[in-house]
Every structure is written in C-alpha cells, then in structure tokens.
Image: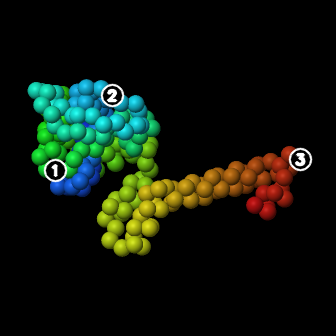
C-alpha cells in the first residue's frame, strides 16, 4: 500500500510495553471503521468509554480498553482519530496492532508521521514541530522549558506579533510617502509610531 496522506495509520503512542497502560492511536479516514470493527460500536465523541475489543477476523477477545473517538478536524492531526487505552502487556499490544494491520486501508505509521500530518493539516507550524522534537529529546529542565514554550506556539505568536507590527508600519510609511499632501493621512501618528 502507498504511504500517502490518504492512508489511515496506527501506532503505539505511549512507552514500550510492558506498562500499565498502552495508548494506540489511529488517524485517517478509516479510523472510525477500525474502531467499529474492534469495539462493535462508536462511543460519544470525546468521551471515554469502556469496551471489550475483539479481533474482527474471528471475534476473539483482545482486551478490555478505554476508547476515545475524536472526529476531525479538531484533533491533533486534523483527521478523524481513535485512541485505544489498553493494558500495556506485550502480547496485548501485539494482538491489537496485528488486528489493525490486517484491516484494509490501515498501516503502521512511520516515525514522525502523526506530526507530519498535524503540520500538513495546519494543526502545527514548523516552530511547533521543532519544539515537539526538542521536547522529546530534552535532557535538562532548561531544555524542557524552552522546548515546551516553542511546542505550545510561544515563539510563533511572538513572530506573528512582530510581523503584524511591521506590516502596519509598512502601510503607514507607504501612506505617508504616497499621500502626505492629503488631509486624511495623519503625519503625526505615523512619525510617533
């Protein structure tokens, strides 16, 4: 299968098993059908719901998990998303991932692919992507604090503020140069600014 933006992807988004909880994310146009195939229902959007996950191939139970159905575009990736909060044993995670991989139109995500989709759908800008990368590799508290500010858009908001101010000043300077002899262009306000 091609590895394009139209594919639906899945990946373990929590730490490697074994762990108390394993969070498996699904993103893309087939996320809803994957959830329906595993849980036999779609829960209320953005509300955690408990369900027994079953392998769609043979109906065998996989795990009892919390489900989150997150319809797009108001998601991390800007696409429909599902989160499965399973028990974090190796065999459970492997069984759920195997069931997902067997579904048509679903494939395992490549490294960084959820972030690429968030960027492609305008959910993150390049500064936030870089901040997230820095946050994930931060080793000191100073690195963590700086990366968190960048990932949350602090730097981008500051740049946008400067950009807006420069555009306003540029427009005022052009007005002063082109229309300074007209009464409706306030020269004093332009010079003060």
Residue receiving disc 3: 183
Q: Secondary structure at mark 2?
A: loop
The spot of residue 106 in percent (x, y) is: 21, 33
Residue drawn 40% across the image and 30% down it:
44
- Kindly indicate the quadrant of the structure image that contains residue 39: top left
Residue receiving disc 1: 89
Q: Secondary structure at mark 3?
A: loop
Q: Is residue 97 above or below residue 133?
A: above
Q: Earlier in the sequence, mark 1 or mark 2?
A: 2
Q: Secondary structure at mark 1?
A: loop
Q: Earlier in the sequence, mark 3 or mark 1?
A: 1
Residue drawn 17% across the image and 45% down it:
93
Between circles 3 and 1, the one closer to the viewer is 1
Asked whether 158 or 16 is in front, the reply is 16
Residue 42, numbered circle: 2
The spot of residue 153 in percent (x, y) is: 49, 55
Quadrant the C terminus occupies: bottom right
- Kindly indicate the quadrant of the structure image that contains residue 5: top left
Residue drawn 34% across the image and 48% down it:
115
The spot of residue 22 in percent (x, y) is: 24, 49
Q: Earlier in the sequence, mark 2 or mark 3?
A: 2
The spot of residue 141 in percent (x, y) is: 40, 72
- Left or right, 64 with respect to 139, comes to left
Dot 1 and dot 2 residues touching (CB under 8 Å) = no
Gap between marks 3 and 1 measured at Cα:
76 Å
Query: Can residue 111 be seen from the camera position used here?
Result: no
Residue drawn 36% across the image and 73% down it:
140
């Amino acid at each position: 299968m091609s590895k394009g933006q139209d594919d639906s992807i899945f990946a373990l988004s929590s730490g490697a098993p074994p762990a108390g909880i394993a969070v498996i994310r699904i993103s893309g146009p087939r996320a809803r059908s994957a959830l329906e195939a595993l849980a036999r229902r779609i829960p209320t959007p953005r509300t955690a719901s408990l369900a027994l996950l079953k392998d769609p191939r043979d109906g065998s139970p996989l795990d009892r998990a919390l489900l989150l159905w997150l319809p797009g575009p108001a998601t991390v990736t800007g696409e429909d998303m599902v989160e499965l909060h399973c028990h974090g044993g190796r065999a459970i995670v492997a069984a759920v991932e195997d069931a997902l991989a067997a579904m048509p139109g679903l494939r395992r995500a490549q490294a960084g692919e959820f972030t690429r989709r968030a960027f492609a759908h305008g959910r993150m800008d390049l500064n936030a992507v870089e901040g997230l990368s820095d946050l994930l590799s931060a080793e000191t508290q100073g690195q963590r604090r700086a990366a968190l500010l960048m990932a949350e858009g602090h730097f981008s908001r500051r740049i946008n503020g400067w950009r807006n101010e420069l555009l306003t000043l540029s427009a005022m300077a052009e007005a002063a140069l082109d229309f300074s002899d007209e009464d409706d262009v306030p020269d004093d306000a332009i010079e003060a600014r």
